[in-house]
Amino acid sequence: MKVFYSDLDNTLIYSYKHEIGERRKCVEVYQGREISFMTEFTWRALKTLMEKLLFVPVTTRTLEQYQRIQLGISMPSYALVCNGGILLKDGEPDRCWYEESLRRIQEARTELELGMELLRADEKVCFEVRFVEKLFVFTKSAKPQETAERLRERLNLKLVNVFCNHKKVYVVPRGLEKGTAVRRLQEILDCKEAIAAGDSLFDLSMMDVVNVGFAPLDLREEAGCVKNVEFLSGGVFSDLLMERLIDAK
């Protein structure tokens, strides 16, 4: 069976701040508020595709954040959360996978701790500094590009990556890429054919290890030398993606 690895936020689901039209379905409630949605077309199409594809969510969300998402369709047999550091099997964390993730990033531990120290001293940081499941560092900054640049100047970039996504700032160890997690899971599944989709720099590494990837057109410049990526434009990305996958069947 072909595997479909997909990011979630801004790939399949969207914040209430994002305009995706009137025909939409709530998929996440937080503190009594509806905060994330799918278009009805994407929801129906994904439900149909899951009968023919093994759908594996791949997200930087924490386990708690992932568990808030209720797609209203059958639970994926596998999901990769915390940027692939945690594998869920039928909704339950795989302890061996997590321990192996920690082992793989052990060399970067000192840099992660230094990253936290630098962020706590950064006056532009406007959120708590989190060491997510001892896997990567996360916070928010009023001037994320400046915060990220300061981190890049001080940290060993052979051991960690620094990412910005709007106000969010991440320090992520090498070896915790989504592509690494997808490759690890591919070995377990022993599946030769896979596709991937995503909208951000976090997602490029997994597109690089599958047969074909799908991304919005505005990611083309950052995609660089990643091969076999098809860029989609002209509407809500999730709908364009579903149309493309349906046509490919």
Image (tube, rainbow, N blue to C red):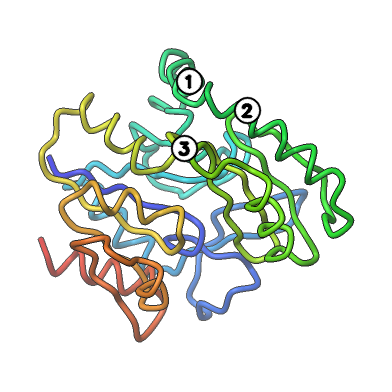
Q: Amino acid at mark 1?
A: Tyr
Disc 2 secondary structure class: loop
- Residue of label 2: 133
In this view of the protein, which residue sits in the foreground, 64 or 226? Answer: 226
Q: Is residue 131 above or below residue 118?
A: above
Q: Amino acid at mark 3?
A: Arg
Label 1 vs label 3, nearer the camera = 3
Q: CA distance from mark 1 to mark 3?
A: 16 Å
Q: CA distance from mark 2 to mark 1?
A: 9 Å
Q: Earlier in the sequence, mark 3 or mark 2?
A: 2
Q: Which mark is residue 154?
A: none
Q: Please rate how many residues cluster around mark 3, counting C-alpha atoms within 10 Å: few if below 14, some from 14 to 19, many from 20.
A: some
Q: Which mark is residue 98?
A: 1
Q: Earlier in the sequence, mark 1 or mark 3?
A: 1
Label 2 with label 1: CB-CB less than 8 Å: yes
- Residue of label 3: 174
Q: Position of residue 69 (x, y in %)?
A: 55, 46
- Horizontal relation, residue 232 to residue 111: left or right: left
Quadrant in the rendering for residue 14? bottom right
Residue located farthest toward the bottom when viewing the structure as drawn: 234
Label 3 with label 2: CB-CB less than 8 Å: no
Q: Please rate how many residues cluster around mark 2, counting C-alpha atoms within 10 Å: few if below 14, some from 14 to 19, many from 20.
A: some
